[in-house]
Amino acid sequence: MVLAALILVPLGLALVALLWPVARQRPWLLPLGGVAHLVLSIVAVAGRPEQLTPWLGLDPIARLLLVAVSVLFLATSLYTPGYLALKPGRDQRVFTACLLALLGMISAILAAQHLGLMWVALEACTLTTAPLLYFHRNARSLEALWKYLLVGSVGIAIAFLGTLFLAYSALHAGLKPSLVLSDLVGDAPRLSRPWLHSGFVLLFIGYGTKMGLAPMHTWKPDAYGEASGLVGTLLAGGVSSAAFLAILRFHKILVAAGDGAFGRQIMLVAGLLSIAVAAAFMARLRDFKRLLAYSSVEHMGILVLGVGIGGGATLGAMLHLVNNALVKGVLFLAAGNIHRVYGSKRAAAPEGLTPTPHEGERGEAADEADRPPPSATSPALASSVPVSGLLRRLPWSGALLLLGFLAVTGSPPFGTFVSELTIVRGAFATGHGAAGVAFLGLLFVVFVGMGSTVLAMAQGPAPSTVPAERRDTLLTIAPVVALLACVLGLGLYLPAGLQTAFAEAAAWLEGP
């Protein structure tokens, strides 16, 4: 019943949001749903309910993700009423309903033990997110929506084909076809190897597209760049993490079949490639929302790299899965505050570096409704004005963006430092020294590239054209502070219960 409630409660509240007559009250259904979901998640994880059917259950990785996504959604839901209050002209009925429905679909992915049901829930996530991406209703958001649907649909179609290949691997071996995870793991040693390998490759490409792994990441810069900060948070911390779990479940079948090395080799190469592509783009990128998109590409690469290395690095990947989800909330919500006030997404270029015309053109996607109103003393912000002087103009959001940058790049004492260090140590301990060295080198490139943009935004004078009346509010700052505190807490102290949960998740993935 608890697992069903995790899915049905958000979906029920989504229906209520569509029917609720008072627009001012409607956004507060989101915190209500967030609190209810977190309570249900804690009950489900602490009680470890038995599977009512073979189709629904929580494996150890799903337990970790369920609580992390629930915390992330609660923080986002507390942020949303303050965000929507600043946009009184926007119809937030569908927006609110889709956010709640998205939570229900992510919960369905995490609880699904039937691979067909998991595929349906992931496709439902794509359809539910589409109206959220088009919230600003301008040309660039429409372009981003089109790319998201087109590339995502191709990816999910490839994943469907891979699922069929996996089912046929049982039929070809003379076994009863099944898409229930426990059945596939039990029958794994007898599955047809060619069909099993082909199915995994297709599934990795398909769900890797949903994750945003390079080179299947082409939708991500546009979608994240045009989405509001709170939608980017749920995409980067929720949907991408759920897609990663889908890949891990198929990898579990490979491990049970005795072919774990096949999957790990693919993930090792794909992880390094994804980090390298992200590092190359982040070196000179001035659009800070697209910068966060490439940061997500990088961290998806880190996750699959950790599992690809195996051993102790798998534990590091499990730690990083939670840390990445939380720190993405800090960055995207802080970036949303900055975009709202400045009306610009282009960071000031560091001294001696001039952004290319392409960067200047692509960096400004704020629609006119989001720009500060013109006045005699404060004219409308021109799209060419770069973001600078954050620590003076928006001290809270500027400080949170700066601290979020340190956290996302693996600086101590944040939790990401612990998880990335665990992956590096695992690489050298398992004989993957070259991968460990390459990983460290790419992390340095990312740190320098991202740091040049973030520091240029935080320092210097604030443009005189930025209206003084637009400031941070308690509702748009407190949830971000709470998420940052969680990431910091995971770096300073990991309770025994959490240590056990992370160890169980790694052991479940690596074990038979």
Image (tube, rainbow, N blue to C red):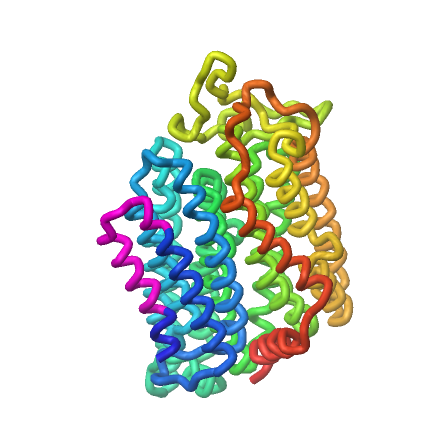
Q: Residue at x 33, y 58 (%)?
A: 101
Tell whether position 19 is magenta: yes
Q: Residue at x 28, y 64 (%)?
A: 12
Indicate whether 196 appears above or below 78: below
Indicate whether 447 appears above or below 356: below
Task: Assign the N terminus to one quadrant of the image.
Answer: bottom left
| Tally of marks | 0
Indicate whether 195 appears above or below 301: below
Task: Assign the C terminus to one quadrant of the image.
Answer: bottom right
User: As rendered, which of 67 and 364 lies closer to the eye?
Assistant: 67
Q: Main secondary structure of the magenta part?
A: helix
Tell whether position 173 is magenta: no
User: As rendered, which of 15 and 314 lies closer to the eye?
Assistant: 15
Q: Residue furthest top?
A: 376
Query: Percent position (x, y) of residue 435?
Result: 71, 59
Q: Residue at x 44, y 84 (%)?
A: 49
**Residue 437 appears in the rendering:** yes
Q: Residue at x 67, y 62 (%)?
A: 489
The answer to whether residue 17 is left or right of residue 74 is left
Query: Percent position (x, y) of residue 242?
Result: 46, 63
What range is drawn magenta here?
A: 7-27
Query: Percent position (x, y) of residue 75?
Result: 50, 55
The answer to whether residue 149 is left or right of residue 345 is left
